[in-house]
Image (tube, rainbow, N blue to C red):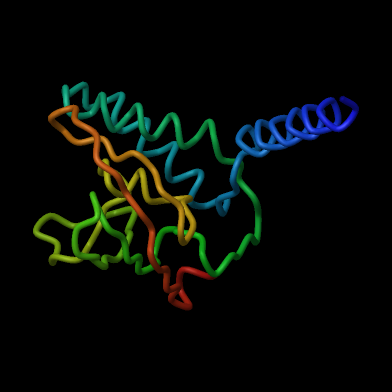
Amino acid sequence: MKSLVQAEQSTNQSHSILRALRNFPSTLPKADHQKLQEHLDDCARAMRPSSQLLAYVLANKLMNTRPVTDVYCSDLVIGGCHVTYAIDGETPQTGLLVHRARAGSLTGVIPVASLLGATLIGMRVGQRAPLLYEDRTIGKLLVIDVTHSAQAIT
């Protein structure tokens, strides 16, 4: 009987640790965090129906990350990095994550101010997340690889 009680206590401790880890905000470089706030402010000014979903994703990202000066993790998706990802188990794609995309940008550029970009920023290699679509359906996003340029690191 004693081993059953110990097993239950161990399970409760494991659940407590997992809850704490889920509630621990991930980190983002301070500059990326500030840019997320700017994108959120832009959504509030735009007042378009499509901006509501983006504002939701951006606000959620801001609530669940904390800004850190001089953070560098080789597997962290940040502005200026190339990220390889898969959506719904399809063929992996690679793109450059940017905070300011120019009109008519080349393919392979992922604006952070998009549902895909706002979901990707702050994720880590191997991490999965739900991806909201404009039609309000939900896909599955997986980060496969991240490559940082020297500019993204500084």
In the displayed image of the protein, which residue is found farthest to the bottom?
150
Quadrant housing the N terminus = top right
Rendering quarter of residue 53: top left
Rendering quarter of residue 14: top right
User: In the image, 46: left or right of 71?
Assistant: left
Which residue is painted at 54% across and 35% down in the image? 64
Rendering quarter of residue 2: top right
Which residue is painted at 41% across and 59% down in the image? 79
- Residue 113 position, x and y percent, is 29, 44
- Residue 25 position, x and y percent, is 61, 39
- Residue 109 position, x and y percent, is 22, 62
Which residue is painted at 53% across and 70% down in the image? 153
In the displayed image of the protein, which residue is found farthest to the left?
104
User: In the image, 121: left or right of 133?
Assistant: right
Q: Nearer the viewer, residue 46 or 56?
A: 56
Q: Nearer the viewer, residue 122 or 144?
A: 144
- Residue 103 position, x and y percent, is 12, 55
The correct choice, above or below, for 24 with respect to 104 in the image is above
Quadrant housing the C terminus = bottom right
Which residue is painted at 35% across and 69% down in the image? 82
In the displayed image of the protein, which residue is found farthest to the right?
2
Total marks in image = 0
User: In the image, 150: left or right of 99?
Assistant: right
Q: Nearer the viewer, residue 27 or 105?
A: 27
User: In the image, 148: left or right of 67?
Assistant: left
